[in-house]
Image: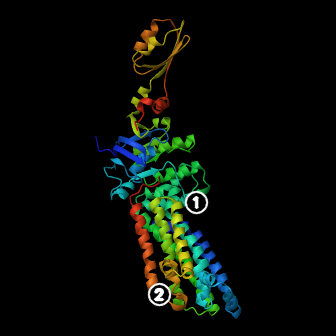
Amino acid sequence: MTGLPIFSESLRDSRLGIALWTLGVCSISGMYIAFWPLMKGDEMQTMIESLPEGLVVAMGYDRILTGGGYVTSTTYGLMGLIVLLIFSVSLGARLVAGQEEDGILELELTGPVPRSRIYLERLLALWASITAPVLGLGVVTVGLGAAFDMGMPLVNVIAMSLGFGLFHAGIGTAAYAAGAASGRRAVALGVGAVLGIVAFLFNAIGPVVDLGWMTAASPVYWYLGNEPLDNGFAWAGIAKLALIPPLAAAAGWLRFRSRDLLV
Amino acid sequence: MADPIIRVEGLIKDYGRVRALAGVDLDVQPGEIFGFLGPNGAGKSTTIRVLLNLLAPTEGRAEVFGIDPASDDGPSLRARIGYLPGELGLAGRKTAGQLLGYYARLRGRGQDRIEPLAKRFGLDLNRPVRGLSKGNKQKIGVVQAFMHSPELLILDEPTSGLDPLLQREFLELTLEAREAGATAFLSSHVLSEVEAVADRVAIIRRGLIVDLSDVHTLRRNAGQEVELRFDAPVSAAEFEALPGVDSVQVQGNTLTCLLRGEPHALLQAAARHRVLRWSAHDRDLDDLFIDFYRDPSTEVAS
C-alpha cells in the first residue's frame, strides 16, 4: 500500500457532492454580494434605522454598511455559514458512521490497514472536502468585492476564510468524531447540528440579550467577531478555532480505536 | 499436528445483556476446509468478526496464525486473509472494476486476478455497483475475497444470492485455493452447501458449538430412516428400547423409526413378527442439522 489510498478514494467518492455544494454556496453568496450596489445607498440606512434594534443586531445588519460588514452578515455569518454547516456535518457523519451503518466500511476495516489509518485518512478527506467550498467562497468574495469596489483587501478575505474554514472543520470533525465513537449516523448528525446551531445562536443572540459570555463562547464569534473582512487577521480567535478539529478528532479516536464495529 | 490456523478458546461475547457467544471452542487446521454451520443468529458472524478484530471478545481468546487479531500485528495478519462478509455493503457510483481496484490498492496486490475471476463468475466490471442485483454484488464479494490469493479464506454465507451454477463454481474455486495451500473457514446455514467440500464441520447453536466432527462421522450419525410393514399391528414399546433406535412411530401395521449404528437388534425384534415390507434410506445431513437446531437437550442455559 502506497500513498493515501483511503484518503484519495474518499475524496473521489464525494467529489460530485463537493463540487455541487461549492457551486451552491458560491452562487448563493454571489447573489447576495451582487445586491451590494443596491444596498449601500441612504435608503438602506433608513430602512435599518426603522427596524427594531434587537433584530438588527441579531441579523448582523448593524454592520452591513461597509462592504466587509455586508459580506460578513449575509454570507460568512448567515447563508454561507448555514449551507456549509449542512455540508460539513453531513459529510462528517457519513465518512465513518454512515458508511459503517451501510456496511461499506467492512471491507476496509478487515483489510490490512490499521484502524488508526482509516480514521486519519478519512478525517483528512473531510478537511480537504471542506476546503473546496471555503476556497470557492473566498474567490467569489475577492472577485465580486473587487468588481464592486467593496474595499476588502485579499489578506482580509484570507483571514476570514481561514477562520471560517477552521470553524467548519471543527463542527464537521465533531460530527465525524461523534459518529466514529458511536457508530450511529443520527448521533453524528445530532452532535454536529446542535453544536453548529448553538454556535450560531450564541453569536446572534448574545449581543441582543447583552450576555457577553454567550458571545464569547461562540465559535462563530471567534471567526467573525473581529470583522476580519474589514480588519484582517485576529489571531486569538483563530487560535481557539484551530484547537477544535484536533481535540474533537482525538476524543472520537479514544472510543473508535477499540470499540465493537458494525454492530 | 501443526499449529492450527484458527484457534478459538472459550470465546464469550456479550452485546449488552445479550449473550451472543457462550464459550466457543474450535480449531481450524492448515489446509482444511472447515464448515461452520448454524441457524441464523447462532453466532457464526459474531465469531468471524472477532477473528477480524471488528469485535472484541468479552472473555476467552481467538488466534489466527497464532496472532491475536486485536494486537498491533492485526493489519499484517489481515493481509493474509480473504474475507467475504455475510452482508456485503458496497458503495454507489463506482463501477465494480473501480471498487475492486480500490481493494487491490489497499492490499497492495490482487489487481491482476480481478479480470480472470470476474470473467469466471460472469461479472461485468463496467457496471456501477449501485444498480447490481444481490447475486452480482455477491460476485464482487467473492472476487475480492480470492483476488489477493490469501492463505486463509473466511467466508460468511458465501453462496447466498448465487445461482446453483455459480455456487458450484464458487466451491470449485475454494477447492482450488486449498489445492494451492490455502485454508478455508466457511460459514453457512445450509449443510448441503458445505458438505461437498468441507473436511470437518462445527455446528453452532445459540452461541455454543454443539458438534464438531469430520463429515464422515457426521454422516454416520445422521443414521437411516427405517420403515417396516407387518401383517398385524405392533406395539411401539417393543422397539423403543432397542439400541440405536429412536423416534419410533407406529401407525396401524406400519412402524417407522430412526436407526443409528448396526441394524442387528432392530432386525431381530422385527423378525418376531411377520414383515411384509421394509425400507431403509440414509438421511440427509440436513435432517441431522435440523435435529441439532431443534433438540432441546442442547439448549444453552442462560
Q: Quadrant of the C terminus of chain B?
A: top left
| Residue B95 percent coordinates (x, y) | 57, 60
Q: Which residue is mark 1?
A: B92
- Marks 1 and 2 close (CB-CB < 8 Å): no
Q: Quadrant of the N terminus of chain B?
A: top left
Query: In the image shown, does A205 or B97 lie closer to the viewer?
Result: A205
- Whether residue B204 is situated above or below residue B234 in the rendered picture: below
- Whether residue A226 is situated above or below residue A126 in the rendered picture: below
Disc number placed over residue A180 in the picture, else none: none
- SS of the residue under disc 2: loop
Disc number placed over residue A234 in the picture, else none: 2
Q: Mark 1 — on which chain does it sit? A: B
Say which quarter of the image contains residue B126.
bottom right
- Whether residue A192 is situated above or below residue B265 in the rendered picture: below
Amino acid type shown at disc 2:
Ala
Direction from residue B172 to residue B6 in the image, left or right: left
C-alpha separation, residue under disc 1 versus residue under disc 2:
43 Å
Q: Mark 2 — on which chain does it sit? A: A
| Residue B168 percent coordinates (x, y) | 52, 41
Q: Nearer the viewer, mark 1 or mark 2?
A: 2
| Residue A55 percent coordinates (x, y) | 63, 81
